[in-house]
Image: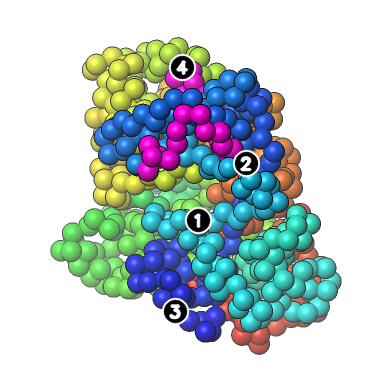
Amino acid sequence: MLLSDGMDTVKGVGEKTASLYHKLNIDTIEDLLEHYPRYYLRYEHPVDIEAVRIGERTAIRATVNSYVEVVKKRTLTVSSFIAKDYTGQVKMTWFNSPYIKKTFHVGQTYIFVGKITIRNYQKVMEHPECYTEAKYLEKIKELQPVYGLTAGLTNKRIQKDVKTVGGMIHEMEEYLPEELVKRFDLMPYTDAVRQIHFPFDYDQLEDARHRIIFDEFFLFLLAMRRLQIYNQHMQNRYQISIGTKYTQFLKSLPYQLTNAQKRVIHEIQEDLMGDSVMNRLVQGDVGSGKTIVAELALLMVIESGYQGAMMVPTEVLARQHYEQFVKQLKPLGICVELLVGSTTAKEKKRIYEGLKEHTIDLVIGTHALIQEKVEYKELALVVTDEQHRFGVRQREMLAGKGDHPHILVMSATPIPRTLAIILYGDLSVSVMDEMPASRLPNKNVVITPDSRETAYHFIESEIEKGHQAYVICPMVEDSDGLEAENVIDYADTLRTQLAPYIQVDYLHGKMSAKEKAAIMERFYKGEIQVLVSTTVIEVGIDNPNATVIMIENADRFGLAQLHQLRGRVGRGADQSYCIMVNTSEEEEAKERLDVLYHSNDGFHIANEDLRLRGAGDFFGTLQSGDVQFQLADIYSHAEILKEAQSAIKYLDSHRYDYEHIDHYKLTEKMNRALNI
């Protein structure tokens, strides 16, 4: 077997399993070996039930104290029983697991492992692992890797397949320059891959993870450095100036621009009129007024005789921008079109022709803008709304549609400036750190679960004023298929708690893109008053009429993500509110939520997130999701990020030829890291 062989060549992997692996971008044996565990499970000594920490994975020794009860609940079959020790009891629950009834009997004692939560004032452990005393004594010595999954593919399956091909790890080639491995005291690549899948002990595992995290940052920064050098050599071929329409539009605005907006617009103007092609990031907090800055830049380019394109993450947001831009730019004689996945074939054909012939000045859309059939005649400026892996691949694909157009990247994820400069190494960075005077800061409150009823009454009072609300559903972890059920259940609960005239609906990740878009459109139009959702609403919808967001289990989110969720409200002229439900007794959770309670400044929050989390203990913790690396986290691993930056500087000082990397494996790894 070869590392490049397909997954269907692995013993026991058939066509169906190979297609599931494909969903995780695992197509070859090498892909599987580079699919690293997200975290590791430690098996600790059992504790008494009364001593368990709610929400944390724990082990208890308990005796089955009731018969197994099986209840049908919509699409789920719920099997449960009560287990006790001398200090208390826990309800053990499984979903769609009919074998449970025959497995557990009153009087049997097991070690149960899982997270205990409180449901209806009762301690509950969902889908616990279960061991006899003897088996558990063996488990205590192990570190069990936990991999990223997709529906239908279990962790045990991936563990088994990794073990099957583990003997091929020695064939994986070291790809970093030898001097870097020595200079930064890095574990050899093959040793790191072996330790990360089959950890010998914590020290070696930590060294292995350090190496892989270093590599992820280094490969990303290497690609950024290549882009930066390439961009520096790109001459600006567009003659752009400030025209009468631009001046007229600026004067017609019903509000004064903030000093931050004026400063950033000036920086963009200098770039557009300069000698080199613009590659600029505008990093601004939610509500800082980035859209109008983008619109002014596009207007400047269009009035100079060229075309512009703006790519955003969702159809709903694309449509909202389109409606706003048409309203403001059509009176100036500017042709604006919308191009999204749901655009009809007939409309798409008309838009393709308009872009090719330059009868369309500005197109706003989703990834439909970078489809093969889309051709532009004079594309001079590309604006992207940053969401996916810093948008490197999307930026390149959209830029490739024109003759080296200017690039403007808008990001609403506040990152400490030092990290932003590192991570956006190919871009000039502008920071919008001021909010428009018309925007009222959100009022924040942190509550405990017993105050939910008061919160529901408050939501009701806001709806009576004609406003709307979001409720972010409790997160569901380690329970496949429960996300949708959880949202539906919560929506049902709210319908019983709120007045009958209030329309409650839900949104979750299992819905199709079309279903999500339809729900968000109805919410935007005011047909839904309360939208119960998972974090899928974190980006992609702008509803000025929504004034309340209630976030359940707020203690489980990262600060940056909580801040992004909070940014869904406060977009209109009315006072908005963020209610965070803290279900944790941990002091750290209270301290983190206290940061959000006292501040609406995203940059301050990002710095506090970095301070509070620090290097962090990565065992058993989930990634924050801000950057889609496999293991690396820009907050938790800031020191390793700086090491990787030092490695790039070292190559710079030795005049490394980035444009002609002669190490094939390094180029391949870099492209794979960026999904190119």
Q: Say the numbered circle drawn on residue 9.
A: 3
Please tell me whether mark 1 or mark 4 is closer to you in this view.
1
Mark 3 or mark 1, earlier in chain: 3
Sort mark 2 into few (<14), some (14-19) or many (20+) by Cα contacts within 10 Å: few
Please state which of residues 93 and 626 is positioned toward the viewer in this rendering: 93
Q: Is residue 463 magenta?
A: no
Q: How many marks?
A: 4
| Label whose residue precedes the other's in the sequence (2 or 3) | 3
Q: Look at label 2 and name its amino acid.
A: Glu
Q: Amino acid at mark 1?
A: Asn
Give the structural element (helix, strand or loop) at label 3. helix
Above or below residue 508? Residue 269 is below
Specify the segment rendered in magenta: 99-123
Q: Nearer the viewer, mark 2 or mark 1?
A: 2
- Confirm or deny contact between disc 3 and disc 4 (CB under 8 A): no
Residue 155: mark in rendering: 1
Q: Which residue is mark 2?
A: 133
Label 3 and label 4: CA atoms lie apart by 54 Å
Q: Position of residue 159 (x, y in %)?
A: 54, 61
